[in-house]
Amino acid sequence: MILDVYEAVTSRRAVRGFTSRQVPRQVLERVLSAAAWAPSGSNLQPWRTYVVTGGPLAELKRRAGERVAAADPWDEREYEMYPAALKSPYHERRSAFGHERYSALGIAREDWEARQRAAAANWDCFGAPAALFCYIDRDMGRPQWSDVGMYLQTVMLLLRAEGLHSCPQMAWSVYRKTVAEILSPPDELILFCGMSIGFEDVTVGYRRTGRAPLDETVTFVEG
Ligand SMILES: Cc1cc2nc3c(=O)[nH]c(=O)nc-3n(C[C@H](O)[C@H](O)[C@H](O)COP(=O)(O)O)c2cc1C
């Protein structure tokens, strides 16, 4: 499928419901080969990607599911997902996102249990038959983490060109030891995030997330 870049960007969203339809290995190879052209400072290409499908993914979901069911504490953090005190306007944006995400599923703001149940679907990859896990060397600094972000967005846009959807998931970092049991990554790597990949289950409700108005995030300095 040839997709206009604007269409790829605007049709990408965090999809949280996938069908069991398999994703062919050759498609994933095509996407990841093209995504390797993402830019990185001095061309370090600091991403290390593991693609997981089939039996190993089923086993990972099973082990993670067991931890969720046992209310197992999260693994100690290798990086903080968010600043401890999220100031304005980020705090408000996060609240708005939470409201959009859970109200689309008919979950009330104060229904903590239902929210937890919905969040637990992260560790089932929202039903997706494929996932990738993106690591970065622990020696790398903030610029290289940003390179990894560009790479991941490139992957997600290319997935759209293949008719596929995705959901990037920092949630997997909280069970990084379970992920490592399946992938056996070298010690020098930190798990940044997982990403569920597959065909969208269109029966799962969602509300499109909004975005801040342009003048909140962009300043034109003109002569
Ligand atoms: C690095 C990164 C990590 C994310 N982690 C999660 C996650 O663990 N679980 C989840 O459901 N969504 C996750 N998301 C998706 C965001 O919530 C989503 O991108 C954001 O709300 C904007 O919505 P949209 O992508 O649908 O436009 C993550 C996104 C990014 C970029």
Image (tube, rainbow, N blue to C red):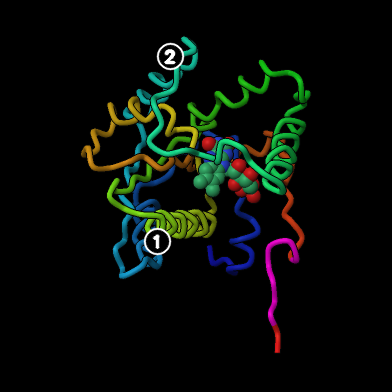
Q: Earlier in the sequence, mark 2 or mark 1?
A: 1
Q: How many marks?
A: 2
Q: Is residue 166 visible?
A: no
Residue 183 in percent (x, y) is at 27, 34
Residue at the spot of label 2: 66
Vertical order, 162 against 202 (above or below) = below
Residue beneath the point at 73% across and 18% down: 111
The residues colored magenta run 215-221
Magenta-drawn stretch contains 12? no
Q: Is residue 36 left or right of residue 161?
A: left
Q: Is residue 181 left or right of residue 66?
A: left
Q: Residue furthest bottom?
A: 223
Magenta-drawn stretch contains 220? yes
Residue beneath the point at 54% across and 67% down: 2
Q: Label for residue 35?
A: 1
Q: Quadrant for ligand 1?
A: top right
The CA distance from mark 2 to mark 1 is: 34 Å
Residue 223 in percent (x, y) is at 70, 90
**Crowdedness near tag 1: few (<14), some (14–19) or many (≥20) residues, C-alpha within 10 Å:** many
Residue beneath the point at 64% across and 56% down: 11
Type of the residue with mark 2:
Glu
Residue 158 in percent (x, y) is at 48, 59
Q: Label for residue 109?
A: none
